[in-house]
Amino acid sequence: MARPIVHDHLVQQRLLAVTAELVDREGPARVTLRDVAAAADTSTTAIYSLFGGKAQLLTAAVDDGFRSFGESQRNAAADGLLGLGRAYRVWALEHPALYRLMFGGALAAYVDCSPTPEVASDSMRPLVEAVTAAQAAGSLRTENPAVVAMAIWGQVHGLVALELAQMNEPGTDWPGIYEAALQGVARAWAP
């Protein structure tokens, strides 16, 4: 009697990473489960067994991105708003395919695929908590913390998206631009 095939956590993680890369490079409509399985050196059976199908695999890849991003934000939370902003850029530059998959909107146009709301909102919780703490310490204006957090997020997100899209002249000092923007955001929300 043959032993059952075990699809472990490593196979699952490899499938999620490969999915993000392939969708980023080819677009969701052109990526097949067979492509993903071949690139991950496994079978389509593993995909069906671990995720269910293409829509579930894509959702899992987006959720995995938000979990990883959220972990990086939680790890940076002790360094306050500036630390969170810096960690945002570092994570995006280290995971460009996941970043575009999470925020690019290509999946929603192709299949009913969006991040699990709790997973996505959990990834931004450190920012809201940092805003609330800074307001309590008197270093940020006391406005709705969710509104302040969204405004800050929009600023850092926009710059990172421009950098990843290579919307620049050769030799552009992205680290310098990003740091100047973080400092500007801090001044803009100062009391």
Image: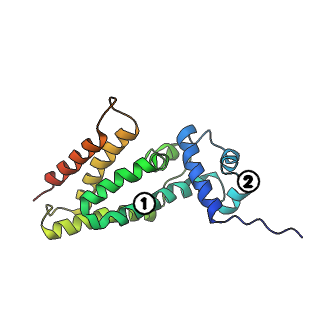
Q: Quadrant of the N terminus?
A: bottom right
Residue 46 figure quarter: bottom right
Q: Residue furthest left?
A: 191
- Residue at the location (42% across, 64% down)? 71
Q: Nearer the viewer, residue 180 or 46?
A: 180
SS category of the residue bearing label 1: helix
| Distance (Cα) linking label 2 and label 1 | 29 Å
Where residue 120 is drawn, which disc sits there?
1
- Residue at the location (9% across, 59% down)? 191
Mark 2 neighbour density, 10 Å: few (under 14) some (14–19) many (20 or more):
some
Q: Position of residue 186 (x, y in %)?
A: 18, 54
Mark 1 neighbour density, 10 Å: few (under 14) some (14–19) many (20 or more):
many
Q: Position of residue 10 (x, y in %)?
A: 62, 62
Which amino acid type is shown beneath numbered disc 1?
A: Ala
- Residue at the location (36% across, 65% down)? 75
Horizontal relation, residue 105 to residue 5: left or right: left
Residue 141 figure quarter: bottom left
Which circle's residue, 2 or 1, is located before the other in the chain?
2
Which amino acid type is shown beneath numbered disc 2?
A: Ser
Q: Position of residue 37 (x, y in %)?
A: 69, 50
Where residue 43 is drawn, which disc sits there?
2
SS category of the residue bearing label 2: loop
Q: Position of residue 25 (x, y in %)?
A: 55, 39
